[in-house]
Amino acid sequence: MAGREEIDRDVVLASVQTLSQERWLARAELARFDYVVVDEFHHAAADSYARLLAVLQPRFLLGLTATPWRGDNRDLMALCHGNVAYEVGLFDAIAYGWLVPFRYFGVADVVAFDADMLTRAGTYDAARLTLAFNTPERAALALAKYREHPSRAALGFCVSIAHADFMARAFEAAGVPAAAVHSAPESMPRQQALDQLAAGRLRVLFTVDLFNEGVDIPCVDLVMFLRPTESMVVFLQQLGRGLRLHDGKDHLTVLDFLANYRRAHFKLPFLVGGQGEDTTSASAALRALQQAQATGSALPCLPENVRIELEPLALDALKESLRGASPLRDLVLADLKELAATLERMPTLVEVHRLGRYGPRQCMKALGCRRWEVMQHLGLATDTDRALDAEAGDFLQEIERTAMTKSFKMVVLLAMLQGGRFPGAIGMPELVAAFRRHFGEERYRLDVNGTKVEGATTEDAAWRRYLLDNPINAWTGGNTGQPGRYFALDEQRDELRYTGPCAGDLDALRAAVLERVTWRLADYWDRPRPGRFVYPVIPQGGAGLCVMFRDGASREGLPLGWHPVRINARFLYGKFAKDELNVVKEQPRDDGSMPNLLAPELRRLLGLGEGASPRRGQRVRLVPLPAEDTWAIEQA
């Protein structure tokens, strides 16, 4: 940095742009670093990053990113061998109180988009968009919407330098202190603009692709999307500029100017609580938004204090964008062809899940055919694929489609595959041992919380009973009253036996089953859980307080009855009811011999005076501590 090249230190901070230069890549010293941290890791599949990582060869690589999506089908996860050390979605972070909630207003734009605004390559032409945006009518609309929402510090994201300059002049002329910040010489210096915004001497900065990442502006409490945004990565990066916590800021206001531009509908799943583009279909998200708008009800998948409001014409623009999109079948096939070309082979279901713009479930629904037929469409089907589908296609499709409220059915198959028992039979003691190992891992413990086998000391007999009553009962047809098509329980031998079709190529069958099991488990654990274990504290009976579980879905994974809890560094016992945690005592006693300590401990935790009620929105987070078989109660 600025001529400093101190590569001989124990800890070195450097930019990829510098280290990826040939003169650095040729230096042997780079290979001595055993621990490498890469920020903005969504760039790491780019060629410059790949060349550098190949030279560094760290023993441990940690990648950090707030936007883990790429548009070029390169596999970020493969760089880290598929390991996710820690993951928290944007809505989770809002629910935990790490980011401020936002209020999103979809504004009906006055700009009409048409084909003349596109280049031959199919992208928007910045010069033509600038002509459409730089009008008194458009500036007046932006100014009017800005004035409807009092703001201390705002950012406006523009399509070009000329657009940013035009908007800054329009706001200045209307008496709103504003500046344009961009790469041209006439721009206000970036740091000077940020300092003046923080000091209140400027109210709005209009920018062009400068503040997407790598800058911290916590005072920003309003963002304006004044250009068509077609990328989830860019949308979240720009939204994130205003989500940082700051004194006096209780929420971020988002003004999104919506019109009939191409792919305007891509953000629909996000607006109903999805974590990425493909969490749910855009059409289903649109229906949910329409219903919420019509009834005035809140969207159940969003954290408290996040509001979504769309003007009727803005909602119409999203509908038009969705109608104008290519048929889903064509989009899915094009995406799979691109992914197959990148990998130079048929992508696995997990690769489609990680890398595709459309997940496996959307692909199956859009194409309406089996996997080997998809391979045929792509020109990648083999005789082995065709034979396997003919022999065991129904069973493979059952794995793809079987309902999963827990991960247990897939873990049964995984245990059989890992133990070399498929196709064949697995004894109950071996299956119990496999489940113990699997759910002994921290990342899977949530799936047994609230069940009869949640404790580390649960006896084998309890595990056996639980497996018989749940995944084995489901696989053997107990939920339907009919014998299972693919599995049977041999009580005499005390084993679960696969009774479904086999194939001439058993290795191909095992690989196909493992591919589907791996995908179903990855999909299961990637399901969005906004506000996981984050609950409001509400008054109850005089000076009492309780932790309220809002609905059945939000308490999934919590225990029932008495369980150890840790609050304010004290180890006590909490009584978990169906809808609330309302009792904490020194011993798990249902009689009145011991006082209920929940209210005083919650007041201490939340900093409330004696007898005071919690403020609206005050929440706690329940954190499972499997090693201690305890639930910690923390301020969210």
Image: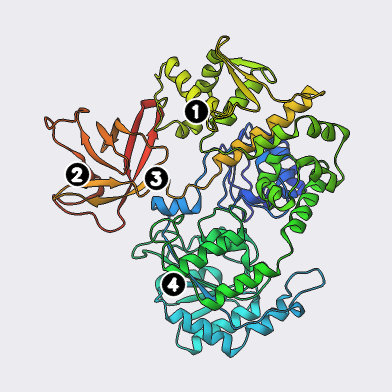
What amino acid is at disc 1?
Asn
Residue that numbered label 2 is attached to? 599
Residue that numbered label 4 is attached to? 153
**Helix, strand or loop at disc 4?**
loop
Rounded to the nearest whole Å, what is the CA distance between mark 4 and mark 1? Answer: 55 Å
Residue 409 shows in the view: yes
Q: Nearer the viewer, residue 31 or 517?
A: 517
Residue visible at 23% across and 44% down in the picture: 602
First in sequence: mark 3 vs mark 1: 1
For residue 470, the mark is 1
Establish if 493 lies above or below 190: above
How many C-alpha atoms fall within 10 Å of the one at disc 2: few (<14), some, or many (≥20)?
Answer: many
Judged from this view, the residue extending furthest toward the front is 482
Residue visible at 72% across and 47% down in the picture: 74
In this view, the mark in front (4 or 1): 1
How many C-alpha atoms fall within 10 Å of the one at disc 3: few (<14), some, or many (≥20)?
Answer: few
How many C-alpha atoms fall within 10 Å of the one at disc 1: few (<14), some, or many (≥20)?
Answer: some
Image position of 611 (left or right of 226): left
Judged from this view, the residue extending furthest toward the left is 593
What amino acid is at disc 4?
Ala
In this view, the mark in front (3 or 4): 3
Image position of 349 (left or right of 66): right
What amino acid is at disc 3?
Gly
Asked whether disc 2 touches disc 1, contact meaning CB atoms under 8 Å apart, the reply is: no
**Helix, strand or loop at disc 1?**
loop
